[in-house]
Amino acid sequence: MNRRTILKLLGAVPVSWWLGRASAQTAATVKFSELYGRVTVRGVEYSSKLKALSGQKVTMSGYMAPPLKPKLDFFVLTREPMATCPFCTTAADWPADIVLVIMPDGKELEPSVRGLTVTGRLDIGVKKDDETGFVSLVRLYADRVQSA
Amino acid sequence: MKRILMTALLLSASASAAKLQVYPYDGAQFVPGQHFDLRVEAEDVRDFKDAVITLNGQAVTGLVKTTTKDTSVEWTVRAQSLGVGTHTLSVTFTDAGGPVTKIAKWTVAATRPEGFQSLFYKPKARNVILFIADGLGWNTVNAAKLVAYPYNPANGTPTGKLAMETGLSSMATVTTSSFDSALADSANTASSIATGQKIQVNALNVYPDNTADTLDNPRVETITAMLKRSMGKSVGLVSSAFGTDATPAAFASYTRRRGDYQAIADQYFNGDVKPDVLLIGGSRDFIPSTSPGSRRKDTTDWIDGSQKLGYQFVSTRTELNAATGSKLFGLFNIDNIPSYLDRAQYKGKETLGDFTDMPFLWDSTKKAVETLDKNPNGFFLMVEAGMVDKYEHPLDWQRAVWDVLELDKAVAWAKEYAKTHPDTLILVTADHAHSLSVYGGYDATKGPGKREAVGTYEKAGFPTYGDQRDANGFPVPETSRTYAVGFAATPDYCETYLGRPQFLDPTVSNGKTGAEAGFVPNPKICGEGAVQRVGNLDPASAQGVHTADPLPLFAFGPGAENFSGVIDQTEIFFGIARAMGLDARTNK
């Protein structure tokens, strides 16, 4: 299957094969504005909602930040569509409220400019990706990624 | 005969096989006693034999020889300095290709009278306040004036001027360039002001070298380090950008890569400047990696660490205004301090978050001066309006221009201070320009994004800025007749001719990677009702870029005569040195 075919598949049936894996439990919806409690010069505090939902299944909607590579086993979800690739620049021009989305093993996604809705397990805390050096504060281990 | 000639040609070709680089570069200028690292690099070396390195005919001592690669040889000696005069470094290098010679001439001009006359010499300026608005080309100054001082519609006369344009002692137009480019970035331009050298794009106060380590490059001592070392002056740095950004960093750090944020943060506290006052944004580089939001890779905590070094730490406008310490460290945001419009007018929760008590540039300028003024030897203060550039890049001219007005109010305060402290030289300039231009009027009642609402010449009429003003006396951007303002260098984007309370990037990713990666106009902005403009930059560009346009320099007070006419940016360094009588041959 070449890249174009996958793209068509994704467009027509948005990642439907993950749908079956998503359990029947209702995932809580988290908005970007609900990620953090206080942000001070000493750092970021997670919101009580985020702390309560850590480890549980949640749904978030946003946009894919400019991607690093043509097929994605991870990407950054942002509140607004963005021009900045968080992986490509060292500058702090990208917002603090970004969420790292990690795709299930063996599942990859095509880059997209459409709005996306991600359902997956929420994980919080400072974590550095050894491969890219990217430091994330909020992660979603995705079960399902759909066009919003 | 022909064969002999060919042999000779071949010999001379092979004789120049090894490539020699000498830093400081040929043509470099210094003030007396300014420290610099001398480095000679030979590349494409085959079978190295020997090298003779002389300064003014004498062998250079203390050189450390290294071989970074199998095909290179380098010599380094750090912290050299020179007296007044012209100096010649000569390198004769010999390897299997034969000898190669390279000459570098350096000039050291006197900054105050030498000999008998020095007995009667008193420096003109004891203090210097240097305002740098990042990206403040002439056109941006003009746009700010047109907004703040609208024309009188009854007779077309101007209703006023900016503080930075009023009561000048002198004025210059400044040209910019980099060591390796006709176009400049904030790192090399601020470094040119700080050291008098031409510096590479992305580098801070260092010359190039052939090693991968960005922190080991040959350094040139900054004016701030010299003023501390040789005259015992205090140094203050203020910026509305994140504090490890290029402009403040250029006055206290050294690196080949301006993105070495952690190293820059460390150099503020253990480098050769150690500013007495540091009031900035961007706490993420000063808090330990264990704090969510930190950008550090270690557990160093400069908020705690600075207090152990005797700094008073402040993080809000209220705390800043109440501060009484003799050394101040202020962090007012985890990242950049948002624009004046966001802080004073829009006050959007999504923009400000929990940072609802951030100082204005005039607050920071005033407190910095009051703190530094305690030193009887005088002070050097650099104040950066760092966000002007950060909003010009994404073509948000309103946020950029209102930040110029914020700076202007800080300049007005400094001019008042100088009335009672007449030994204070005030300079207002920029690091580089952007292509902002006011080209018409805009009937906002017909907008947004109606091309027919752009009026030129007399159809532009007079904009109505100033019909409403905020608590600081600044006009509000929303009014019925505004200016049509645009940029020459742009990506594809949608023009609405109006601003918005929530900042939006002009472009978004096209979702592609590799060679196809590019940017398209932000659909949210296009949806506001907009004229779609075809850009003129590479489709991979997300925003506007710096230009080679000239910059203004406004000078007030003693030593201002050192700044006049059309000057290169490096001359700002020498002008300040002459005004303050900086001679770095002695240590205080």
Image (tube, helix red, strand yellow):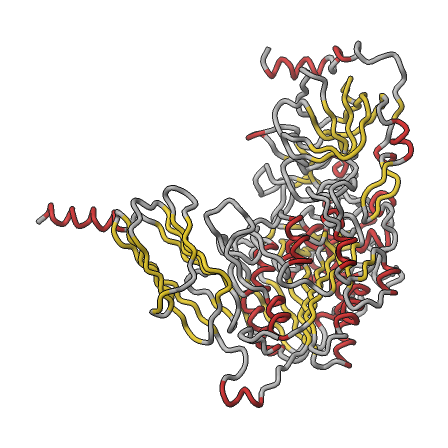
Q: Quadrant of residue A137?
A: top right
Q: Quadrant of residue B93?
A: bottom left
Decide which of B495, B34 is in the foreground and name it.
B34
User: In the rendered picture of this protein, how many numbered marks are placed on residues?
Assistant: 0
Residue displayed at 56% across by 53% down:
B203
Decide which of B173, A31 is in the foreground and name it.
A31
Residue B413 placement (x, y as % from top left): 79, 71
Q: Is residue A123 left or right of residue B171?
A: right
Q: Is residue B334 visible?
A: yes
Residue displayed at 62% across by 62% down:
B272
- Position of B473 relative to B200 (above/below): below
- Position of A38 relative to B272 (above/below): above
Residue displayed at 69% across by 65% down:
B382
Residue B451 placement (x, y as % from top left): 72, 45
Q: Quadrant of residue A127?
A: top right
Residue B346 placement (x, y as % from top left): 86, 50
Q: Is residue B159 visible?
A: no
Decide which of B412, B336 is in the foreground and name it.
B336
Residue B300 placement (x, y as % from top left): 72, 48
Decide which of A79, B536 is in the foreground and name it.
A79
Furthest residue to the left?
Answer: B1
Q: Looking at the figure, which quarter contains the C terminus of chain B? A: bottom right
Residue displayed at 79% across by 12% down:
A19
